[in-house]
Image: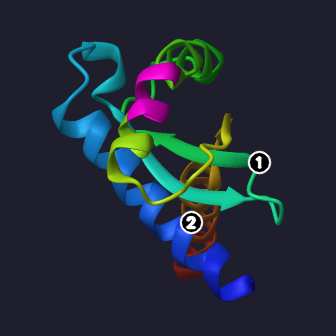
Amino acid sequence: MKYRQDRLNKELMRILNNALLYKINDERLSWITISDVSISPDLQIAKVFFTQLSDEADPKESIGLLSKASGFLKNEIAETQVMRRIPELVFVFDDTEKKARSIENILDNLSKEKKED
C-alpha cells in the first residue's frame, strides 16, 4: 500500500502543478507551486503543500484561493482517471524554502564575522 501512496502522491503533484501552470487563468495562482502531496492511507484526504515564488503574497490568502479552486483541481484529477474516488484537498503552506534562506543568511553572517576576527 505504501508504494501505491507514494506513486499517487507524485502523480497528484504532477497533475496539480500542470493545472496551476497551464489551465487556471487566475494571475494570483500563477506564483504558486505544489511542492509535495501527502495522501492519507485510506485515500480520502490529500494534504497539498505549496510554495510561493512571490514573498509579498499572504499564505492565508493563497490557501483561500486554492480552496476556491479545489473543485476545478479535483475535476482535473478525475479526468486523468488515476483514482476512482477523488480525495478531499487540504492546502498547507510549505515554508521550508523560507526557513532555509534564513539559515543560509545566518551562516553567511557568521562566516563574515569569523573572517573579520
> What number of labels is visible?
2
**Image x and y of residue 78, in percent:** 43, 42
- Compared across the picture, whether 89 is left or right of 69 comes to right
Pinpoint residue 110: horizontal percent, then vertical percent.
64, 70
In three-dimensional space, the C-alpha distance between marks 2 and 1, rounded to whole angstroms, equals 13 Å
Is 102 or 18 nearer to us in this picture?
18
The outermost residue toward the bottom is 3
Residue kind at label 1, given as amino acid type: Gln
Q: Which residues are magenta?
A: 71-75
* SS for callout 2: helix
**Residue 68 within the segment the image draws in magenta:** no
List the residue tagged with mark 2: 9
Q: Position of residue 13 (x, y in %)?
A: 45, 57
Q: Of the numbered discs in the image, which one, if any, rests on residue 44?
A: 1
Which image quadrant is residue 97 in? Answer: bottom right
Q: Nearer the viewer, mark 2 or mark 1?
A: 1
Identify the residue shown where x is 68% and y is 48%: 46
Which residue type does callout 2 highlight? Asn
Identify the residue at image location x=52%, y=80%.
115
**Quadrant, the N terminus:** bottom right
